[in-house]
Amino acid sequence: MKRYFKYILFLLILIPSYSLPQDILQKQYSYALEKYNSEQYYDAITEFKRLLFFDGGKKYVYDANEYIGLSYKAGAKFSDAILYFTIAEINAGNNEELFNSKIEIIRANILRRTTARALTLLDTLQSDKRFISKKGDLYYWRGWAYIFSDQWDKAAQSFNMTDTNKTMVEFCKNVQHEKYSVPFAEIVSHFIPGAGQIYTGHYFSGVLSLGWNTLWGYLTVKSFVDDRIFDGLVTGNLLWLRFYNGNLQNADKFVKEENLKITNNALDYLQSGYHGLKP
Amino acid sequence: MKLGKFIQPVVKKFPLFYKEGIKGRSMQPINVLYSYTIYVTGYKFLITVLTLILFPSIKTSAQTDWVKWGKADYSYRINSTSTQRDYSIGLNSPGRFVLKSFANAYWIFISDVDGDNCSFSPTCSNFFIQSVEKTNIVQGSLMFFDRFTRDMNFTGKLNHYPRVGDGHFYDPPSLYILDRDYINYIPPSVVIMNE
Amino acid sequence: MKKILFTLILVFSTVIYSQEKNQPGNNDLFSPVNIKKFADYLFCQKDYLRAADEYERYLKSIPDDTIEFKIALSYSAMCNFSEAEKRLGTIKNTSNFFVPAQMLSLKTIFQEGDIARFRNAYIAKDSDLSIPKDSGIALLYNFSSLLTEASIHNEDDFVENFPYQERSRIKYFYEWKENPPEKSPLKAALFSAIIPGAGKFYAEEYSDGIWAFIATLGTAYLAYDNFNARHYTRGWIFSALAAGFYAGNIYGSASAVQIYNTRIRFDFVNEVKTFLEDKNYFLKVFDFCK
């Protein structure tokens, strides 16, 4: 018995000094979590900050910072969220935590549409040997990064690299297929003024454009034929060119507007109708 | 003229003693801060660099939480920057009816199909309508001719007018009705959102 | 003997632990002492709204005028001056912070931008507390006359109110107030009437001036040319345009000068603001975070 005395003594010193405050911290953690779960994000941050302040042993430093980040994210304050996810990342205790915090940073970057940053971070993770088994996850988030930057064809390719998201592949391909082609609208408008507008369904604008261009074109040509060079130059430059240019601008504008509608409809569906993991 | 005569309205008009932004418009906070700093010294480049360096430290000083906030109703949608014309005629006065009918006809048959030729916001035709509404047909026309002249100046707009979100130069008629109380000066470095 | 040793070690270890920095003193994170510790931390992190809330929570159990003062400072730092002023008003006249609170309260009124109210409030407080003439708030009061309508009259008397090192700046502000470097819209209109665009040059809008000149003379030339060529309709159209550009340029020059005047005022107010912020409105800085 005497042999074990010093170990018992040591244990007895440890038990009261650690277990008591740890209970309080555990209680505080649950309390903060309760605030977070009941969507009181501002208060949740206060309570997680309180936990961090008193957590001298830094036991909760990862979890609390991660939850603070998640709270900011829920309030759409993505830059603040990224700041706290980064603190969590620095304090990650194992690879799993490290990966999770990095992914959270990527997701916040996707949401605030800093796509280039999200893609760079994904590249870094992809070349990291520790996360070789997470390739599918990385392609999945890469797909979302492309969706948020309106590049549906690249999104489809990325989802295709994961094994489980074939519906997303189809969805992205469909969106891409539905969209109007900017180069096509521009090219046809160069040859037939108003054709680009008609292609996007803006018939009145297209016909009007064609009408003005025909009129000013005719008058310009007629001026030159009648040897009224000055009139020809003025009509050509100030009127025909103006409306011709307007036709090109409108073709581009309408295609972008229509494509934005298609994109937004798709994004609306993904936000409310899609049940998989979202950024 | 003594400073006192105008400094009071100025202090009220430019909320410089409190950081709220200019009335009736929401601005990006960085720009407000940035322009204030710039306009104090005039060493534009140096201050721009300094402000940009200082910005992250300001950002991390918990300003987000100086107002209580809740769960955000965040939408995935991409916001459109294109502005929609107001084609409504409005029957409050015969003058407006005539003016707006002409304007609408001009917009529908000419302006909408001849491209984006006006770098200002509001556009020249809109500026004319608003000017006439705020003043009268004579003063409104003078304001329009002045605006048209300034629009021709294709080199002098940069660093001269503030911008709105879609990149057009913000130039409202209220600045030109010769009433000092309506002049709400906004430095060119500001980007005006939700104009 | 062993039992005594055990008990001692047990007690001792708990005590040592509880005295570590940031550790909960009486095992409760929401005890007043811990709330205060946490609030102080938030305050120094500039997380002022949370700090103010925590201080409020602390005040519910322990009245403390330092904390009341710090709540007001928090609101003031967040530029919520009306709330700051309200909080400062609750500090009792028996408190050590009463006088600083009164001074800070005056400063917040000033920061709200209502100079007339600030000056009236200062006079009222002065009759109550007889504020020393060399105190910071007295300097702010003197300074505020730069922002009122009335003329100051005696420059030397005014400037001498301020510490020696500030006098050159104060002199500059004084001269600006008495003789602002404004331009005359009437002059601009006259210049433009004589030479189109000249008024815009006067308003320092050089490129606009050039274009006003080109537009007016260009359309006038076209009118002349068309009349010469007996194209009367075109001649009249260009005449009308020339007249429009000419009149518009006179009008526009006057309004350009008005905008110029507003801009220099804007810059001046910015200078004043920066100067005052730099000097913390002549008041003592309360730094609770050293």
Image: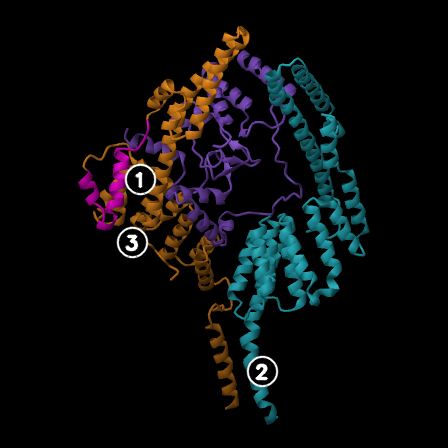
Which residue position holds label 3? C94
Label 3 or label 1, whichever lies nearer to me, is 1
- Residue under disc 1 on the same chain as residue under disc 2: no
Amino acid at pointer 1: Phe
Vertical side of B145 occupied by B29: above or below: below
Q: Which mark is residue A11?
A: 2
* Residue A108 can be seen, yes or no: no
Amino acid at pointer 2: Leu
**Alpha carbon of mark 1 to alpha carbon of mark 2: how far?**
66 Å
**Total of numbered circles in the picture?**
3
Indicate the secondary structure of the residue bearing disc 3: loop
Q: Main secondary structure of the magenta part?
A: helix
Label 3: chain letter? C
Whether C257 is among the magenta residues is no
Which residue position holds label 1? C118
Label 1: chain letter? C
Nearest the viewer among C39 and B168 is B168
Q: Which chain is purple?
A: B
Q: For mark 2, does the 10 Å Cα neighbourhood hold few (<14), some (14 to 19), or many (20 or more) residues?
A: few
